[in-house]
Image: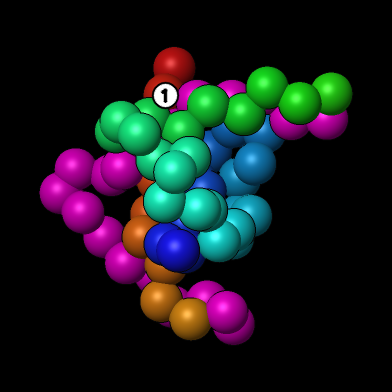
Amino acid sequence: MPLIYHWGGPRHGHVDHVPDEQIVSALLVYDGPKWIGVYEPLDPPQVRDTPQGPAAVWIVRE
């Protein structure tokens, strides 16, 4: 289960474990009542140290 660091958008700064089955493409889409956003991996890929461990940086897609 990858650890994702969100950069920009409504989830900026959130770190989440994202189940593999939710990453079916290069995009993460959140469509809940609280958060709406589309994120994609930063290019080139980057990793940020977080209290939960190393997390891949995904940036908001605008």
Q: Is residue 44 above or below residue 39?
A: below
- Displayed quadrant of residue 40: top left
| Image location of residue 55, percent across then percent down | 42, 67
Q: Is residue 28 magenta?
A: no
The residue tagged 1 is 61
Q: Nearer the viewer, residue 34 or 48?
A: 34
Q: Is residue 60 left or right of residue 26?
A: right
Q: Is residue 42 left or right of residue 62?
A: left
| Image location of residue 46, percent across then percent down | 26, 60
The number of discs equals: 1
Q: Is residue 28 above or below residue 1?
A: above
Q: What residue is shown at x 52% (from left), y 53% (from top)?
A: 18
* Visible residue check, residue 59: no
Mark 1 neighbour class, 10 Å CA radius: few under 14, some 14 to 19, many 20 or more? some
- Displayed quadrant of residue 17: bottom right
Residue kind at label 1, given as amino acid type: Arg
